[in-house]
Image (cartoon, helix red, strand yellow):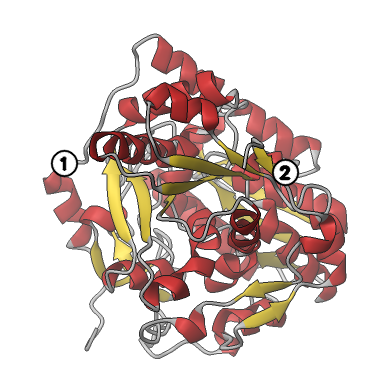
């Protein structure tokens, strides 16, 4: 195949989402009620989610139809292209064949609208007037603002404070699409006020912002909560990515990928990209699936596999996942979308079972890989995406050293055109590598909730 770009027609866009739950090596541990410790039922989630999303959260159906109205909006940018990175291969002098799935072509510049559009659709159908959410670097907040704009919903975004000031143009994007954006923690919620009183100089965290958004939704009858990662229904919606990749690799003449790589914060882009391939690995195919996170927030590589809250204030159900502790507040690295204390329970189960491997990368080498990619392939990666590219470059170099001609596929989850301040810091030598101190990790883990029998 000589083409740089492998496209699909609109007719080849997936008509159904793939639900991995029936194919797991063992059932996922249930969510637990934070007050009773008992498994959460649909009625417990109904105050903040529409019933259709709650049913998707627990569904054991392998295929779930994508509503026509969601498909119509998807067609603004889907199917997204799969590119062969010939120039990167040449620069690395590698025999590896490198492909990247370009999710940066969406209006918001990332993979996030794949679930934002679906969530806005189901909430609109349920009669909801407003959605409240959190965002780290702003990719999710801007995606939900876009989706709410399409469906005539109001949108309130609690943006992690350090990112609110680091990423002003993502905030502008949200506001252009009609969202109200606040730097979290705020004075608008009890959770925000309590955290500000306890930690007045906190840079904020996704856990804190989630607490505020959940409280906002739970205390307003016309408002629901919307989450851009972690939960099962979010992973489900993102599988359009991996389903398209399967068809595109066939068109490229590739029998299978040897290595799949994606960055992980909460897990949505990674899961949507790789879950459609997991069953092939479970059936015995030799496919390595690599999740890449920052050393500053090493959830999968240094966290505990335990029940924990999804937020800082302890308002959410208890979730079995790899966690650094719900009180963990990571440093203000520029990959704001990867600064979450936990990860998707579906992803964590597969890591725990050895199906998926995880690695952590420091900030400076990550930006070095991003610069190389920009200089060879022309697109500036988001700092989050650059973590996956760091691992991609390393795998390609390993192929050069061993002489193996492997097929490496990476999820290019978003562009970095609104992250140039981070690149300025990198080019000026102001970025620092950060590995979270073991003592701080142990302090946060010591505050994990005690769940009998877990």
Q: Position of residue 200 (x, y in %)?
A: 38, 38
In which quadrant will I find the C terminus? bottom left
User: Is residue 190 something one can see in this rendering?
Assistant: no
Q: Position of residue 246 (x, y in %)?
A: 59, 61
Residue bearing mark 1: 437
Left or right position of 167 against 423: right
- Comparing 122 with 236, the one in front is 236
Q: Position of residue 389 (x, y in %)?
A: 43, 37
Left or right position of 109 against 40: right
Q: Quadrant of residue 57?
A: bottom right
Residue at image location 35% in from the left, 73% down from the top: 349
Element type at marker 1? loop
Badge 2 crowding class, 10 Å Cα cut-off, few under 14, some 14 to 19, many 20 or more, is many
Above or below, comparing residue 40 to residue 445 in the picture:
below
- Comparing 349 with 185, the one in front is 349
- Comparing 449 with 402, the one in front is 402
**Residue 250, labelled with which disc?**
none
Q: Position of residue 1 (x, y in %)?
A: 62, 43
Spatial distance from mark 1 to mark 2, Cα to Cα?
A: 37 Å
Q: Quadrant of residue 245?
A: bottom right
Above or below, comparing residue 148 to residue 6 in the picture:
below
Badge 1 crowding class, 10 Å Cα cut-off, few under 14, some 14 to 19, many 20 or more, is few
Above or below, comparing residue 162 to residue 143 in the picture:
above
Residue at image location 60% in from the left, 33% down from the top: 415
Q: Closer to the observer: label 1 or label 2?
A: 2
Q: Quadrant of residue 126?
A: bottom right
> Marks 1 and 2: CB-CB under 8 Å?
no
Point out the tag, 1 or 2, that comes first from the N-terminus.
2
Residue at image location 87% in from the left, 66% down from the top: 69
Residue bearing mark 2: 106
């Amino acid at each position: 195949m000589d083409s740089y770009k492998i496209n699909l027609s609109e007719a080849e866009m997936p008509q159904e989402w793939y639900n991995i739950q029936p194919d797991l090596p063992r059932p996922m541990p249930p969510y637990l009620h934070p007050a009773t410790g008992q498994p959460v039922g649909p009625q417990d989630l109904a105050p903040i989610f529409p019933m259709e999303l709650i049913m998707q959260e627990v569904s054991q159906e392998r295929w779930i139809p994508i509503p026509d109205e969601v498909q119509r909006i998807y067609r603004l940018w889907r199917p997204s292209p799969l590119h062969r990175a010939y120039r990167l291969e040449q620069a690395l002098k590698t025999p590896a064949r490198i492909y990247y799935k370009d999710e940066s072509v969406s209006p918001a510049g990332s993979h996030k609208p794949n679930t934002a559009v679906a969530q806005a659709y189901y909430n609109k159908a349920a009669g909801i007037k407003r959605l409240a959410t959190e965002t780290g670097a702003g990719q999710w907040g801007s995606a939900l603002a876009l989706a709410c704009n399409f469906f005539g919903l109001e949108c309130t975004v609690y943006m992690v404070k350090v990112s609110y000031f680091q990423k002003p143009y993502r905030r502008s994007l949200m506001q252009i699409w009609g969202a109200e954006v606040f730097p979290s923690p705020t004075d608008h919620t009890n959770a925000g006020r309590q955290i500000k009183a306890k930690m007045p100089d906190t840079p904020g965290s996704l856990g804190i912002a989630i607490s505020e958004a959940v409280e906002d939704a739970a205390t307003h009858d016309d408002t629901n909560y919307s989450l851009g990662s972690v939960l099962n229904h979010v992973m489900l919606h993102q599988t359009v990515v991996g389903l398209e990749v399967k068809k595109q690799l066939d068109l490229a003449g590739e029998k299978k990928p040897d290595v799949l790589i994606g960055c992980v914060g909460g897990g949505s882009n990674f899961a949507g990209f790789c879950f459609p391939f997991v069953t092939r690995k479970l059936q015995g195919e030799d496919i390595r699936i690599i999740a890449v996170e920052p050393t500053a927030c090493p959830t999968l590589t240094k966290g505990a596999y335990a029940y924990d809250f999804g937020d800082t204030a302890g308002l959410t159900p208890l979730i079995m996942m790899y966690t650094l502790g719900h009180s963990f507040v990571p440093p203000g690295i520029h990959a704001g979308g990867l600064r979450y204390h936990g990860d998707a329970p579906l992803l964590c189960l597969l890591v725990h079972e050895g199906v998926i491997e995880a690695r952590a990368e420091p900030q400076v080498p990550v930006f070095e890989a991003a610069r190389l990619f920009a200089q060879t392939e022309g697109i500036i990666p988001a700092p989050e995406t650059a973590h996956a590219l760091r691992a991609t470059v390393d795998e390609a170099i390993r192929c050069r050293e061993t002489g193996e001609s492997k097929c490496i596929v990476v999820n290019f989850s978003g562009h970095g055109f609104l992250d140039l301040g981070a690149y300025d810091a990198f080019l000026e030598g102001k970025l620092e590598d950060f590995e979270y101190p073991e003592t701080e990790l142990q302090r946060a883990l010591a505050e994990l909730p005690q769940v009998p029998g877990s």
